[in-house]
Image (spheres, rainbow, N blue to C red):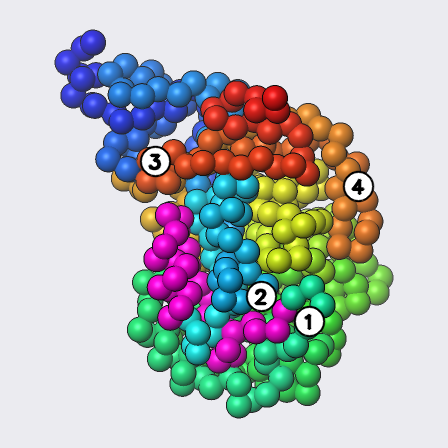
């Protein structure tokens, strides 16, 4: 061993994978070196002297996946799933909860879920004081129907106390979720977001109000989640063209997020938008107690679905790593630059005849899947879980665990 190699003293080197790092413009076969929980180097022939070397030839080495729309206030809200389970299954390192908690119950989320999890968990705080309190398989009660349930000052105060974990304000808009209050709920959420200087994530549901009315109120950096929901109230006009209000919103910097969920990904909308070169900015799962059972399942499945819709692999990875990190104003995450936390997701792209399904029941024949190989959080290898709805399961740096 050379003195130079010994001096480097890398803790881990992932050797020979295709490194995809949108933020730093990297797309090529390199080694990735980790030391003291941070990215130490990316380059050729870094393995000499490393304490541990993993051969990831043929695999994709990406920044740790970030799911910007999840529901993980587990056991305290009826819609939420276990963050550990979903992270292991979807090869994610960072989860962002999309408004499960409001000012009235955020402290429990912080102390009993976030603080207990080894994964990174952030939150958009719901403008509704009790958060999403009435969402389950046979219960649907809107949390934003009464102005009295949306006290702006309480939302602002809770965010100011918790800026380390709260990354913005969340509001669900549309149909029975807001009822007669309608756009009034959006106005209150924007008031709170303006007061704290953070982004607003806005759910778009059934009309009223219309998709155009909602997106027209959003500011640069705000997020329209469920962007490719099916008609009625989709991003497309009756003739199939993208709404002018949607294109105008993109021009001024509004971000568009997939958030598949149980009702928010339709092939007709998606294919129509992509065919007009209107791509999403962000890919997320909206994983919750219903969506976790399909057809959305989780972030990795949703990424595979978009890959089969014609997005490129670099696009899909960027929309699930760098772009969500920047959207939540955590630029230290979502990339593999030297000094960044060593959050790394290793994947393989495999041939598959899996048949995908959207939320309306429409099916599309797939040709490829992204499968998890390994996940590292600050350089520590994390456990992966089987994906029973997709075969094969790769796992453990390339070893096939089907048997």
Q: Secondary structure at mark 3?
A: strand
The x and y percentages for residue 103 are 43, 77
The quadrant in which the C terminus is found is top right
Q: Secondary structure at mark 4?
A: strand
What separation in Å lies between label 4 and label 3 (alpha carbons)? 37 Å
The magenta segment is 107-135
The quadrant in which the N terminus is found is top left
Disc 1 target residue: 139
Q: Are marks 4 and 3 in contact (CB under 8 Å)?
A: no
Closer mark to the observer between disc 1 and disc 4: 1
Residue 339 lies left or right of residue 145; in this view the side is left
Disc 2 target residue: 78
Q: Are marks 1 and 2 in contact (CB under 8 Å)?
A: yes
Q: Are marks 2 and 4 in contact (CB under 8 Å)?
A: no
Report if residue 118 lies within the magenta region: yes
Instruction: Give the number of callouts.
Output: 4
Q: Secondary structure at mark 2?
A: loop
What separation in Å lies between label 1 and label 4 (alpha carbons)? 30 Å
The x and y percentages for residue 349 are 60, 28
Looking at marks 2 and 4 on the same chain, the residue that comes earlier in the sequence is marked by 2
Disc 4 target residue: 364
Closer mark to the observer between disc 4 and disc 3: 3
Give the residue displayed 39% in from the left and 21% down from the top: 54
What separation in Å lies between label 3 and label 1 (alpha carbons)? 40 Å
Structural crowding at the residue carrying mark 1, measured as other residues with C-alpha within 10 Å and reported as few (<14), some (14–19) or many (≥20): few
What separation in Å lies between label 1 and label 2 (alpha carbons)? 10 Å
Instruction: Name which quarter of the figure residue 137 lies in.
Output: bottom right
Q: Are marks 1 and 4 in contact (CB under 8 Å)?
A: no
Looking at marks 1 and 2 on the same chain, the residue that comes earlier in the sequence is marked by 2
Q: Can residue 235 be spotted in the picture? A: no
Disc 3 target residue: 380
């Amino acid at each position: 061993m050379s003195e130079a190699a010994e001096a480097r003293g890398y803790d881990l080197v992932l050797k020979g994978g295709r490194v995809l790092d949108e933020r730093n413009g990297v797309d090529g076969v390199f080694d990735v070196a980790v030391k003291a929980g941070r990215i130490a180097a990316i380059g050729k022939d870094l393995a000499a002297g490393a304490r541990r070397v993993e051969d990831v030839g043929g695999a994709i080495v990406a920044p740790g996946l970030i799911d910007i729309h999840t529901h993980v206030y587990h056991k305290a809200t009826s819609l939420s799933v276990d963050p550990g389970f979903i992270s292991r299954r979807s090869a994610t390192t960072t989860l962002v909860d999309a408004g499960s908690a409001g000012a009235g119950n955020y402290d429990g989320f912080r102390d009993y879920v976030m603080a207990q999890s080894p994964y990174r968990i952030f939150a958009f705080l719901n403008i509704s004081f009790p958060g999403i309190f009435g969402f389950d398989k046979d219960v649907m009660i809107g949390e934003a129907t009464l102005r009295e349930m949306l006290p702006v000052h309480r939302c602002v105060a809770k965010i100011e106390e918790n800026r380390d974990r709260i990354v913005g304000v969340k509001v669900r808009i549309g149909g029975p979720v807001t009822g007669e209050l309608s756009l009034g709920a959006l106005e209150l959420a924007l008031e709170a977001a303006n007061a704290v200087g953070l982004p607003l994530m806005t759910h778009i549901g059934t009309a009223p109000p219309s998709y155009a009315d909602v997106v027209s109120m959003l500011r640069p950096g705000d997020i329209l989640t469920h962007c490719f929901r099916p008609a009625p109230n989709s991003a497309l006009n009756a003739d199939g063209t993208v709404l002018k209000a949607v294109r105008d919103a993109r021009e001024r910097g509004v971000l568009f997020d997939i958030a598949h969920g149980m009702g928010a990904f339709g092939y007709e909308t998606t294919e129509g938008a992509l065919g007009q070169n209107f791509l999403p900015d962000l890919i997320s799962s909206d994983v919750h107690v219903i969506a976790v059972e399909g057809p959305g399942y989780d972030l990795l499945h949703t990424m595979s679905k978009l890959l089969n819709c014609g997005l490129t692999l670099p696009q899909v990875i960027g929309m699930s790593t760098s772009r969500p990190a920047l959207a939540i104003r955590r630029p230290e995450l979502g990339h593999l630059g030297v000094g960044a936390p060593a959050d790394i997701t290793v994947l393989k792209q495999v041939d598959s005849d899996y048949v995908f399904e959207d939320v309306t029941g429409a099916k599309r024949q797939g040709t490829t899947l992204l499968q998890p190989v390994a996940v590292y959080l600050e350089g520590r290898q994390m456990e992966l879980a089987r994906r029973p709805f997709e075969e094969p399961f790769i796992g453990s740096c390339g070893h096939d665990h089907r048997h």
